[in-house]
Image: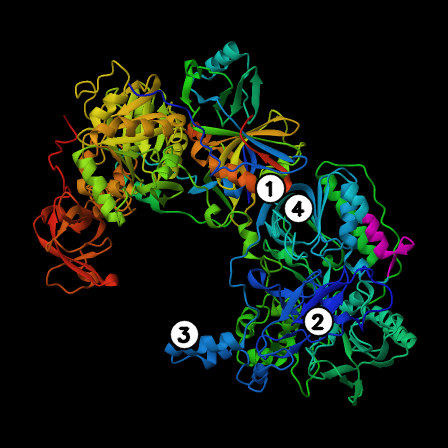
Amino acid sequence: MAEPLVARSALRPHVAPHASAAGAHGVTLREVENLTLASVAALRGREAELVQAVRAAYGLDLPTGPARVASGKVAFVGAGPGKWLAVSSAPTEFSTLPAAVADQSDGRTVLRVSGPKARETLATLIQLDLHPRTFGPGDAAMTHAASIAVHLWQVDDAPTYEIATFRTFAATLWRWIVEAGQARGLDARAED
Amino acid sequence: MSQPNRLASGGLIDRTRPLAFTFDGRTYSGHPGDTLASALLANGVTLVGRSFKYHRPRGVLTAGSEEPNALVELRTGARREPNVKATVAELYAGLEASSQNRFPSLAFDLLAVNQLASPVFVAGFYYKTFMWPAKLWEKLYEPLIRRAAGLGRAAEAADPDPYEKTTAHCDVLVIGGGPAGLAAALAAGRTGARVILADEDFALGGRLIAERRELGGQSAARWADEAEAELANLPEVTVLRRTSVLGAYDGGVYGAVERVSDHLREPAPHQPRQRFWRIVAKRAVLAAGALERPIAFGGNDTPGVMFAGAVRAYLNRYGVAPGRRAVVYANNDDAARTVADLNAAGCELVAVVDARGDSPALHAAARTAGALLVFGGAVARAYGGQSVKGCEIVDARGGSFNVACDLVAVSGGWNPTIHLTTHLGGRPQWRDDLAAFAPGGTPPGMTVVGAAAGAFGLGEALAAGAQAGAEAANDCGFSGGTFDPPRADDDSGETRGLGPWRVPAKRGKAFVDFQNDVTVKDVELAAREGFRSVEHLKRYTTLGMATDQGKTANVLGLALMAEITGRSIPATGLTLTRPPFTPVALGALGGAHRAKEFKPTRLPPSHFWAEEQGAVFVETGLWMRAAYFPRAGETDWLETTIREVETVRTKVGVYDASTLGKIDVQGADAGAFLDHVYINTFSTMPIGKARYGLMLREDGIAMDDGTVARLGETHYYVTTSTAHAASVMRHLEYCRQWLFPHLDVHLSSITDQWAKYAIAGPRSRDVVAALADDGFDVSDAGLPYLGVKELTVCGGTRARLFRLSFSGEMAFELAVPARYGDALIRAIMAAGEPFGICPYGAEALSVMRIEKGHAAAAELNGQTTAADLGLGGMMSKKKDCIGKVLSQREGLADPARPRLVGFKPVDRSQRLRGGAHFVPRGAAVTAANDEGYMTSVAYSPSNGCWVGLGFLARGQERIGEIVRAVDPVRDGDVEVEVVAPVFVDPEGVRVRG
Amino acid sequence: MRIPCPYCGVRGLDEFAYLGDATLIRPDPAAPGAEAAFHDYVYLRDNPAGLHRELWQHASGCQSWLVVTRDTRTHAIGRVEVARDVAAARGSGAE
């Protein structure tokens, strides 16, 4: 029998370079690894059943709009009418939900961008208005970062954003955030 | 380093810090706060360039971004930038500038002989002179014209500096930081609204810092300083200096360029040279001011002829006297300030020529300055060649006399800067009370204030700005915060500059468009030759078509045409402006994403492993795919590819098939949905089976192909071609949401979720067996051809195994979650090593699919039907699908259409070419005899010759026939034999068993 | 141009993919004269100066197809509806 397969990130330093500016860091960039992700779509006529099941299993009310609700290690992020991205930082079996569920744990890479210059850095890639008056913790959006499809949500007021992108685009997105962050006190490296 | 024309005091420059710079190799000195133009003028340099067509000596006409004359090359080497306006180029230590469009030197320009030949160079000369013989155009005329005419030289090396693009959102965008704009920004900003104030200058204030004015009991410049300080302290206000708002777009979107580092020798590390701003504003206040316009008189382009408002800017803002002996020539009262300011600066006022009758303001100013006052007169001509030495003045009775001077300050009135109001189709309105065009319609959400709206008084500009700023903020839901504009000193009277537009010329050219060398005579000629519409005038004479887009020229040209043709100005017309307001570097439009970062690069799961193997990569759409894996001693791609193909056909090979689009389809109606979009039927396919599928566009043409596997009762797995993955997903969502909204079906892209490797070749089963965990039956009974199963591999990693083949060999597609993709390719190579496995790339894959006659992008080319592809039999007769109805129409069902067949060269040593067209043997190579075309070719190791696929009329009936494959572009003409489009294992034995 | 997506909010034109006339209804393939009806459906378009109901997809957002009412003269965006709701309400489609 062959050796067990080792999991690897889509990011390697030669395509997703690390950088650490001297002095205070305006923006930090990390990969959030080992997430369980799934796309969840409500089956026709069984929408209420899904809402009930999510409430029962995770104590969460599915958001009806582009928002993120979280409890413990599990979060649901609005992904379109009747669609959500389920996110968990612990192994979680979302496929038992009464819904069309597709595992995306490997389909997405999630980057965390944080710090006082995070908004300014992201503004070079993302055209959304991330001003605190219009976008805050719990808000989510699907958009593109200079043509790379992203699904992002704000976690806290640091501000911290988590940005899910398709895995095969992740190295490019990392490089582009690094490029934009270089002049803004960037700290980009692997999680400690 | 003396600055002979620097005034002893005054100006917003830092006299404590000298800045050395060079112009045409000579070193001069200026100060922080100077532009290159002000510094040159301070140093007594008035000749700064040569004109576009006639190589006339040119100086500085304006003090702003409308400058048509003083264009220079800035910097050297890779950072050399042509056509920089000296009037906006901010001085820095070590600045290097050179004049352009002169040969061999600025003062002695051989090409100035163009002036003597000027009858040849009149309007339309391109059309008239170079009409024929046409073949001379490329070799003779164009190089000649390019040397003689033209502007600066672009850098020859790649621009080393980064650029950045960014987006900003605001409640209120204020365009222009003059009095009206500052008032608007303060009024809006104090409410707490999010405000962006953008000004193209490096200092805020607009005319406030160019004039000697008082506001609220202090100098206007001081007031502007305080306003800027307050704005800087308002947390939701962003002030963007050095930022030109270039265009207004639908939905309250504005484009702007910030010159972040243009005022530095080179950008600081990681700082962009320029930043392009996409500004999304709920409301906008346009406070762009006004631009002065010329009067057309002889020699009005001589260095030393300058706009009267610009003269004040140099005196007051920069502490520079543009001349010491001045003549002021104007048709409005505003120029009275120029008279007063020149007098205050100690300059001699030789004469004040008022084109109107006697007017109190100019009269008083002239008297105070002790100047000769000529009312109802004109400056007929300025003379002096490389700098003004004097001018000829005509008085009201027609008498003329010459005066010596070194500066002629001209004002033909003011044009409101309305460009942004026209970008969405707003049509400016001529206002007789202003003798100028004022905004007609404006983009939704925009208010125009101050001089841009034709309100030239300082007090009214402040009041209107404050009101517009407050209203804009209120509209966005903000209230509170008050701003009472300060009291302004009195405005002079008449700023209306209605004519004369030109002075009947005795001698010398009278210029209308300085940058494109368009003269009054050119406009007259255009009128004579019938080019009287404004659009014709523009194109025939090139009026307004230079890099300044005619900011100083257009209204004058229009007025002249009106006068010549006896029409009113509004009846004569107006050319609308388009973005950008000022020229933009392409680098700024591109931003950070250029060269290799122009688009994202998608890296498939085996990428890092393939790099280690020394693979040669090929870009396929966004993907970086391994093209082939050369081994030591192999000399070219073909040798490597042949070896990879032969290994797959005799042993086993592995290919990263992860780039194919993968879509998870679930729902009670998933099968029914797929039946709608594919020509064949999937609702009845058993679970655990896969099948090839073809989808059509509604017009009956093939759209994409792929495989569909059924994983469960309500669960399918669809693959698309790599190239069409995104468009197929969009199409399927369109079908799901719009055409078949009642179906319970859900689509999820899982392309990136799975790493998928094709393991192909006679020994492929051995390799899979070595990877599969105990108990999984890899035999043909356990997983027959077109079977699908879930399993675990390598000790517990869940996987999907598909018995599918693109190569024509026995093959499996093994998929694992992408995080294991890197480990799996290594495991496959290790497991396959005893069987002689090799990795193969896109080249070998392409050879093998051609050998098997599988259609790919070259065949699914947007012109072919299922029947053309030989797949007509797949179309279900029992159901409808997208494209079925129109695929049966007469033209598409015609049996004479070209059909997919194979080709081999009759002389087996000959090479085939994709793109060759088929003609019958013995027939002429004409379009009438064209019978189809070759789509794909490859050297087939299995056949020992080149083979091709292509579409040939009635091809399926012509197997064995010989036709010509003609490729006129590459001198190809090869006789080919028509064969069945399968070159390997035609019975399809190998994929089974 | 900016389009208010009912789910995502107002977004720039670059996030949307255009298809065209939203008033066209896919003909019944089984009805007599289907080929002519499909020909018109696929090829014939009005080109109104003024309000136009048209299909857009929020391709870089929630993937929703939308029925957008746009003034072709000014690019002013009026009503924006979720296409699936519009289609379901009019009872189109095969089932």
Question: Dot 4 lies on which element?
Answer: loop
Residue bearing the label numbered 1: A182
Q: Is residue B427 above or below residue A139?
A: below
Q: Which callout, 2 or 3, points at the residue further toward the start of the chain?
A: 2
Mark 2 vs mark 3, CA separation in Å: 35 Å
- The amino acid type, in three-letter code, at marker 1 is Gln
x and y, in percent, of residue B770 in the image: 25, 22
According to the image, label 2 marks what residue? Answer: B60
Quadrant in which the C terminus of chain B appears: top left
Residue at mark 4 to residue at mark 1: CA–CA distance = 36 Å
Q: Residue at x 50, y 79 (%)?
A: B125
Foreground disc of the pair 3, 1: 1
Mark 2 in CB contact with mark 3 (< 8 angstroms): no
Q: Chain of mark 2?
A: B
Query: Residues in magenta?
Result: B213-227
What residue is drawn where x is 75% and y is 65%?
Answer: B434
Marks 2/4: CA distance?
A: 37 Å
Contact flag, marks 4 and 1 (Cβ < 8 Å): no
Give the mark count: 4
**Element under label 1?**
helix
Residue designated by label 4: B445
C89 lies above or below B435: above
Whether labels 4 and 1 belong to a single chain: the reply is no
Q: Residue furthest toward the front?
A: B633
Q: Residues within 10 Å of mark 3 (few under 14, many from 20)?
A: few
Where residue B789 sits: x, y (%)?
Answer: 27, 20
